[in-house]
Amino acid sequence: MDGEHLEPQRGTALLEEELGVDEELWTDDSDTDHAGWYCVATEPFPCPAEGCTFVAEHMTAAHLILVWEERDDPNLLRHAQRAKEAGRNPKVVTYEQAFGPSASYYAWEAAGRPVHGIRRKASKS
């Protein structure tokens, strides 16, 4: 790479110091309606990113509610346990669109697990 500048690609998580004015949070671009899937409701907790005012009431990644198709998915249960250990009083609930935007846990994993990850908007040519 030797000083070569590579443009970030869609879904690429970047370090916060690489943020620019035309960047936005990662999104799950699958357009899947996750209504009826399962998520983990928690006590409200702030986004850990410096200067971010987002407060979550569900297990999230990049401000998207993480959802699973199966209520007993081992990864859902593991994340609920971690929330319990952090004192967030987790409850597995059926996801509703009214909760806010969502992302499949497995799409999040495939994207490299961005937490407050961002991507560049497509440049206008």
Image (cartoon, grey):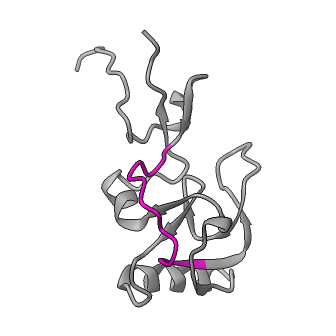
User: In the image shown, does 8 or 102 lie closer to the viewer?
Assistant: 102
Where is residue 2? Give x, y as percent: 24, 16
Is 45 drawn above or below residue 16 in the view shown?
below
Which of these two is toward me, 63 or 33?
33
Q: Is residue 40 left or right of residue 28?
A: right
The answer to whether residue 37 is left or right of residue 85 is left
Task: Place residue 105 in its image quadrant.
Answer: bottom left
Residue extending farthest left: 1
Instruction: Note whether 115 is above or below 66 in the view shown.
Output: above
**1 left or right, relative to 22:** left
Q: Position of residue 16 (x, y in %)?
A: 55, 37
- For the stretch drawn in magenta, the main secondary structure is loop
Image height of 16 relative to 27, above or below? above
- From the top left corner, tell me how far across and down residue 13 is, in percent: 42, 42
Q: Is residue 31 above or below residue 91?
A: above
Q: Residue at x 44, y 24 (%)?
A: 122
Quarter occupied by the N terminus: top left
Magenta region, residue range: 26-40
Give me the residue at 52% from left, 72% from top: 35
User: What residue is drawn where x is 57% and y is 75%?
Assistant: 95
Q: Residue furthest top?
A: 125
Q: Residue at x 41, y 56 (%)?
A: 113
Question: In which image quadrant can residue 94 be found?
Answer: bottom right
Quadrant of the snapshot with the C terminus? top left
Is residue 80 a member of the stretch shown in magenta?
no
Count numbered badges in the picture. 0
